[in-house]
Amino acid sequence: MKKNESINSQCPRSGKEVASNSCTLYRGYTVGFCNPGCRDDFRENLAERPKDRAYFDKLIDNLTQ
């Protein structure tokens, strides 16, 4: 994985490819979405997005094992 590259290749919401302008940090890892709207919604409403967090938590757990 390259620096600043998201740990996921597909958006957890739509299944579409991650857009380069739609990444954010979560638990110290770069995670991506298919568009900036999804990214901003996740970032601004983290507590209300358990499905997104579970998706990224699983990926992070796999990376750290």
Image (spheres, grey):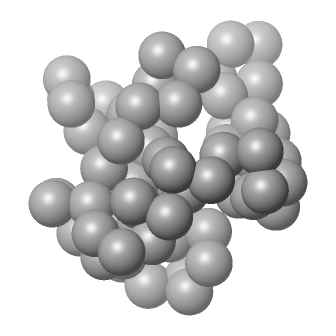
Residue under the point 75% across and 58% down: 49
Query: Is residue 60 among what the camera can see?
Result: yes
Q: Is residue 60 left or right of residue 21?
A: right
Tell whether 36 sits left or right of 64: left
State the quadrant of the C terminus.
Answer: top right
Task: Pick the residue in front: 28 or 16.
Answer: 28
Establish if 59 lies above or below 29: below
Q: 60 above or below 44?
A: above
Task: Point out residue 26 in the picture as x, y percentages from the top left corner.
Answer: 53, 30
Task: Identify the residue at image location x=61%, y=68%.
Answer: 12
Q: Percent position (x, y) of residue 31?
A: 44, 44
Quick one: 14 or 37, which is closer to the camera? 37
Q: Residue at x 51, y 50 (%)?
A: 44
In the rendered image, which quarter is residue 62 located in? Answer: top right
Whether residue 62 appears in this view of the structure is: no
Residue nearest the viewer, comparing 2 with 37: 37
The furthest residue to the front? 44
In the picture shown, does residue 55 fall above or below 64?
below
Q: Nearer the viewer, residue 45 or 30?
A: 45
